[in-house]
Amino acid sequence: MNRQSLLRIVLAMTGVLCASIFAAPQTPSSKPQKITDEHRALLIRSLQAEHAFTKISFPQGKKGVTIKDGKVSPGPMELAQLVSREGPAANTGDRILITDLRFEGDKIIFEFNGGPRKGLKWYQHISVVGMGGEVPVAPTDGRAQVSQGSVITLEFHSYIPDLTADEVKVLLAPALDFTSMTVAEAYAKALPPKVQEAIKNHQVLVGMDKDMVQYSLGRPPKRYRDKDDKGRDYEEWIYGTPPEEVQFVRFIGPTVAMLTVMRVDGEKIVRTEPEVELAAKETEAKPEEAAAPAKRTKKPTLLAPGEENPDQKTPPPSGTGGGSTPDTTPAPHYASTK
C-alpha cells in the first residue's frame, strides 16, 4: 500500500468521525418534555369533578395509594390491612368523584370524595365580634370537620412529563376505571346535545331534572326544603363552600326552577329562564289512561267454581211487584274454629 492510498483511508475515516460528531446533537431526544403551566391548567379543568369507578379498595387518611410505573403500592395484603384499620374510603366497584388535584415535584396528587383532610379551613377560623356576640364568617354544621375521602398519588421519575387528560386516565387505570358506562351515562346518551354538553362540562341548566344535576355535579353536600314567596314548596341543593364558588340549585317539583351562583369575586348570577325543555317521562300516565275508569276487581269468595250461593236471592221478575224490594239478607258469616 502506497502513501497516497493510506492518506485516502485516513481522510475517509476522519470524515466519518466528524459527520458522526456533528450529527449527534441533531438527533432528537426520546426524553419527554416537562409539563407546561398551560397543560397543568387543562388537566385540572378536565379531571377535577370527574367520576370514576374503583378497581381496588382505598383506605381513609392521607396515605392512600401510590401508582408508579403501572404498579400500585401498598400491595394487596398490606392494603387490605390498612383498609381494615383505617376504614374504607371506597370499596372495589364504588363510584368516586375527583374533588381536587395538585402538582408536587414529580407527583400528581388526586383527592377524591373530599380528600382526607379533617378540621376547619383557614376562613372557618375567622369570626366577627359585635354587639350581638361573636359570629363566624363561614359557620359549619360539624360535618365539615370529618372527611371520608382519600388520595391517589401518581408518581413519575424526576419530573412530571407533559401529559393529556386521556394519558393520565390510562396511567390511573390500575386503580380507577373511567370507561365503564353507568345507567346514568347510558341515560345521558339519549338526552339532547345541549344537555349532554352541560353534563360533560359539569354545568347546570334551568329545566334539568334531579338525575341530570346529580350526574353533572354529584350528590349535593347540603340540601334543605322551604317555601318561596309564592307559597310553593321547593328543595335547594348547595354545592361548594365559601370562599370558593357556591351554586344554589332550586327545584320546584323534579325540575330546576332557579340557579344562583356566587362567584369568588363576589358576583351573583341568578338564572330563572328555562334553558332546556325535556319531554315528559314515559312513566307518567297518559291523558286517556288517567281518564279511564278503574277496573273493578272481583270480590274473593269461598264457593267452588260453578257453585251457587244459597244465601243470594234471585231478584223477582219484573211485574211481580217485588222488583223494588231491596235484599236485606245479611252476608254469610264464617265462624273461626278453635
Image (tube, rainbow, N blue to C red):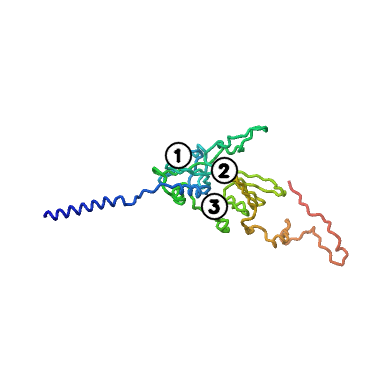
- Answer with mark 3 or mark 2, whichever residue precedes in sequence: 3
Q: Residue type at mark 2: give it.
A: Glu
Of the residues shown, which amino acid type is indicated by label 3? Asn
Residue 122 image position (x, y, % from top left): 55, 36
Disc 3 versus disc 2: distance between alpha carbons?
A: 18 Å
Q: Is residue 201 left or right of residue 305?
A: left
The foreground one among 269 and 157 is 269
- Quadrant of res 302: bottom right
First along the sequence among labels 1 and 2 = 1
x and y percentages locating residue 335 in the rendered image: 76, 49
Nearer to us in this view, 168 or 70: 168
Q: Which mark is residue 170?
A: none
Side (left or right) of 38 relative to 141: left
**What's the residue type where badge 1 is placed?**
Glu
Question: Mark 1, residues whose alpha carbon is within 10 Å: few (<14), some, or many (≥20)?
Answer: few
Q: Residue at x 60, y 53 (%)?
A: 205
Mark drawn on residue 201? 3
Q: Check disc 2 and report the residue beneath it.
A: 244
Nearer to us of marks 3 and 2 is: 2
Q: Residues within 10 Å of mark 3 (few under 14, many from 20)?
A: some
Disc 1: which residue: 78
Q: Is residue 45 visible?
A: yes
Task: State how far apart marks 1 and 2 are (Cα).
Answer: 37 Å
In space, the residues marked 1 and 3 are separated at their CA atoms by 37 Å
Where is residue 239, by image quadrant? Answer: top right
Residue 1 drawn at (x, y percent): 11, 55
Q: Residue at x 49, y 53 (%)?
A: 179
**Mark 3 vs 2: CB contact within 8 A:** no
